[in-house]
Every structure is written in C-alpha cells, then in structure tokens.
Amino acid sequence: EVQLVESGGGLVQPGGSLRLSCSASEFTLSRLWMSWVRQAPGKGLEWVANIKEDGSEYSYVDSVKGRFIISRDNAKNSLFLQMNSLRVEDTAVYFCANVKSGIWGPGTLVTVS
Amino acid sequence: QAVVTQEPSLTVSPGGTVTLTCGSSTGVVTSGHYPYWLQRKPGQAPRTLIYDVTNKHTWTPARFTGSLLGGKAALTLSDAQPEDEAEYYCLLYYSGPWVFGGGTKLTVL
C-alpha cells in the first residue's frame, strides 16, 4: 500500500527545536515535489513548505521563514522538517504530502507549550 | 502573501447542488494557480479531490466537479450525499508558495 508516515512530533517548550520525519512506503518519493501542511487546533489547513524532487528548490510560508528547514534524503525515501525557534502558534498536526497525487500521511502532533 | 477566500459555511439538501468558490486577493484565479480542492473530515487526513482546476482522482466521486467561474475557482457538488458533509479547502499556487483558503464547512441537511 502506498503510504506516508510522519514521526518526530511531541511536546516542546517555546524556543525549542524538533525534527519531523516522513517515510514513504511502496512508492519512490524522489520523483515527487513534497510538502508539509499543518492544521492548528480549531483552525484551517496551512501550507508550510515544499521541496522539489532533487531538493534544489523550496518555498516556505512567511511565518516559518528563517526558522524551519525542509529537506529530503531520496536514498532513504524520506522527507524532513527541521523546526527551530518554535512558538506557541506552531502548535498543530503536521502532515507530509504530495498534494497532487493525493498521498498524505496521517499526521504528527507538535505541541509548543 | 496572498489571501485565498472561501465561503465559511454552506448548506445543501440531500440530492441538491451547491457550488463552493475560491477567490484570490491578487485578482482573477486562473489555471496558472493550479487550483486544488481537498476534503477534510474529523479524524482523517485531508483527501485531494480535484487538482489542476478540473482533474479528478480515481477516488473522487463523479458528483464533484472543478472549474473556473467568474474569476474564481469553483467546486460544484451535484446530488449531494450525507457523506459529503465535511470541510472543503482550496489551495492555490503563487509561483513558489502555496496558500490554502480558510475552508468551507459544508452541511448536508
């Protein structure tokens, strides 16, 4: 079954760091642009970042620029999100996805408190 | 960054038709924004229904149709079913960043 699974979420204090990982199964992640999307409690979906197939291009939502870094390791079929200087407002469920193909992970909860 | 606007809530009767829209603060929504429509139900991951304006996935019910309408992206649901009750989000591309709309809570009642 084609799937993505996120890991690395948890509870962290403001100003702290976390690194999210996303592993792909039954498909080759290296062929796809990949994204991180989040949803804060009681809020809507928010696109966070994406990265080109070979990692040569990436974009971020303004609110995370300079704090978050998206990366990938195609040899390990994995996607990452390094989150630094975390704020209370970064609290959310974080999803990795290739939105166009409709492949989404179940999400991992990040709580900054 | 741009702001993407959707109706906060809509109600449709079972068997009825409803159109959800997606506007952009930068002006007319075009195919260059590659509009997506996603469905979100509680406890489930988002599900991509429509991509690149009109394209459906194999899991997208035929009663959902994407289009460009009056300068906006649109999602039309025909013959609404109770299981279509959910939040619907559009997603637009802005030459680098992507931006979600605020979502439309659709009630089938």
Image (cartoon, rainbow, N blue to C red):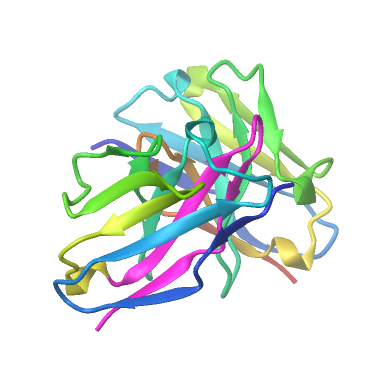
Image location (x, y in percent) of residue A96: 50, 43
Q: Closer to the camera, B3 or A82?
A: B3
Q: Does the magenta stretch include residue B99?
A: yes
| Residue B108 x, y percent position in the rendering | 26, 78
Q: How many marks?
A: 0
**Residue B12 visible in image:** yes
Q: Residue visible at 53% across and 19% down?
A: A53
Please name whichever residue, A47 or B108, is drawn nearer the observer in this view of the structure.
Answer: B108
Task: Report whether A51 appears left or right of B67.
Answer: right
Q: Quadrant of residue A56?
A: top right
Residue located 67% across and 51% down the image: B25
By secondary structure, the bulk of the magenta-drawn segment is best described as strand
Q: In which quarter of the image is the N terminus of chain A?
A: top left
Res B41 → quadrant = bottom left
The residue stretch that appears in magenta: B85-109
Q: Nearer the viewer, residue A71 or B45?
A: B45
Q: Quadrant of the C terminus of chain A?
A: bottom right
Residue A105 is at least partly visible in this image = no
Could you tell me residue B5's position as x and y percent? 58, 60
Q: Quadrant of residue A81?
A: top right
Q: In this view, does A47 lie to the left or right of B19?
A: right
Does residue B63 sit above or below B87 in this rendering?
above
Q: Tell me if residue B93 comes above or below residue A57 in the rendering.
A: below
Q: Which residue is drawn at 19% across and 68% down?
A: B80
Query: Looking at this rendering, what residue extends furthest in the bottom direction?
Result: B109
Residue B21 position within the rendered picture, expressed as x and y whole percent measured from the top left: 45, 58
The question of residue B26 being in magenta is answered with no
- The relative height of residue B50 versus residue A42 in the rendered view (above or below) is above
